Amino acid sequence: MAITVAVLMCLATGGLAGNEPLEAWKAGIATVVITPEQPMWMAGYASRTKPSEGKIHDLYAKALALEDGQGTRLVIVAVDLIGFPREFRDRMEKEVGARYKLPPEGLLLNASHTHSGPELRAWRATQMWDLPPEQIELSKQYSETLRGKLVELVGQALADLTPARLSYVYARTGFAMNRRLQGAKGYSIAPNVDGPVDHEVPVLQVLSADGKKRRALMFGYACHNTTLSDYEFCGDYAGFAWRYVEEAHPGTTAFFITGCGADQNPTPRRTLEWAQQHGRALSNAVEAALLARPRPVRGPLKVALEEAMLELERPPSVEDLKKQASSTTASLYERRHAEELLAELEKTGRVSSTYPYLVHVARFGDDLTMVGLAGEVVVDYSLRLKKELAGPAVWVAGYTNEVSGYVPSRRVLEEGGYEARGAIVYYSTIPLPFTSSIETLIVDKVHELVRRTRTAASQ
Ligand SMILES: [Zn+2]
């Protein structure tokens, strides 16, 4: 017992004193408008039949650069976009590495997953095959321009690094509803009040070194950003939420980080009023969190970024693929997906059996662990990781660094439905469903990186 108490006291002392004084942090902030300058095809819904028509408000990219007393840096880039393709992330990582000596693990991208933004990968996804060539060209040009803007943005945030204090707190709000409803024919997308949700709203606060000025509020929520489905550019509920936070705190930059909301929809939805009301509910949760006394976040900062090699199902036989490609009962996208697999088999003789999946961990001393998972991540991951990593505050983001498909848990994969396999035909990047090892492989990688980024005080 005495040993336990001694260890606990040691932990407490180590934690309070920390390896860093509070003042050791530096933070820098930059923002840029990324609204396309002309009508463009919009991302997220295969049912759209024409390019965008105007905007409700501008789309933004924002960067928060953080540096601890030992010079370790992390730049978090939050954008009002559907998600980043892997090749976008890889090229941007190289460019910020060359220009600012920022290592790969120092760059964390997160997309709000608004379905009212431009399509970045019109030449890849199967539902985009019918686009007019000029729209495909516009999408390529937009991606190029965007990368240039984001590289500049990272530079501006790093140039803005000035002494800061960090603190963390959270509250809750309830408009995200589980959207996997079981019926006679399996799971469909419909509100399911009994399904799992993660209603927490994590908030990272960045104050000036003297604590007098609130420089940034970064907050998150696990919910699809899909209130709207029309033809005007808009940040959806997330875009309204950060605007409301900024209106309430003049001079503060607000950042939205998407959580593990792949199987969650804002409910109700489909009107501008609902997007605004959900934005208001989320910004109210940020206000509630601030009343709940944010706790100091100390360093040191440790970051790690690695791939977990996920396993994919074996492809159907050539015979079955041919049947599917010419089936009269299969959807257009199912037929195209079968054609793509056939073309790949013909060209290379095989279809990939693995997928390199990015896992990002940023550990802020013993006070906060941020986990950034790639893809459209279902809520089971944040609920599980928050339980298993309990101790320091845990913030689990999805839609991080790359979005190339859904990331089901073992449960969702076994239950089936859109997030398990139905959505695969709309993406061209992950060719086949994951095997049931997916959850273990991802969670094990998170634990490995969390162990590696553990500070001396907590060992
Ligand atoms: Zn989605």
Image (cartoon, grey):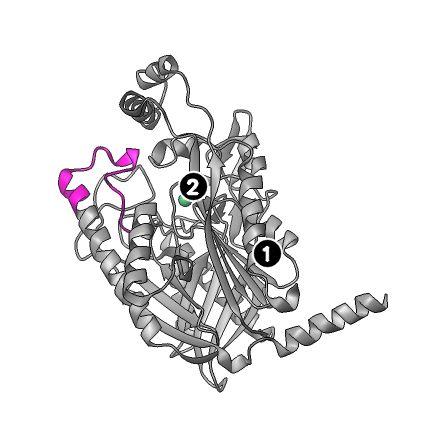
Residues drawn in magenta: 117-137
Please tell me whether mark 1 sits on a helix, a strand or a loop. Answer: helix
Mark 2 Cα within 10 Å, few/some/many (few <14, many 20+)? few
Q: Quadrant of residue 183?
A: top right
Q: Which residue is mark 1?
A: 451
Residue at the spot x=33%, y=23% of the render? 338
Mark 1 Cα within 10 Å, few/some/many (few <14, many 20+)? few
Is 48 inside the magenta-drawn segment? no
Q: Answer yes or no: is residue 447 visible.
A: yes
Identify whether 362 is placed above or below 41: below
> In the image as oriented, which residue stretches furthest toward the right?
1
Looking at this view, is 459 or 148 the one in front? 459
Q: Does the residue tagged 2 have its C-beta within 8 Å of any atom of ligand 1?
A: no
Residue at the spot x=34%, y=71% of the render? 157
Q: Quadrant of residue 54?
A: bottom left
Q: Which residue is mark 2?
A: 356
Q: Quadrant of residue 20?
A: bottom right
Secondary structure, magenta segment, majority class: loop
Residue at the spot x=38%, y=46% of the render? 403
**Residue 250 place in picture, x, y as percent:** 39, 79
Q: Give the image quadrant in which the ligand numbered 1 is located.
A: top left
Please tell me whether mark 2 sits on a helix, a strand or a loop. Answer: strand
* Disc 1 residue type (three-letter): Arg
**Residue 99 place in picture, x, y as percent:** 27, 65
Identify whether 84 is placed above or below 408: below
Of the numbered discs 1 and 2, the one sitting upstream in the chain is 2
Looking at this view, is 410 or 48 the one in front? 410
**Quadrant (top left, top right, bottom left, bottom right) of the N terminus:** bottom right
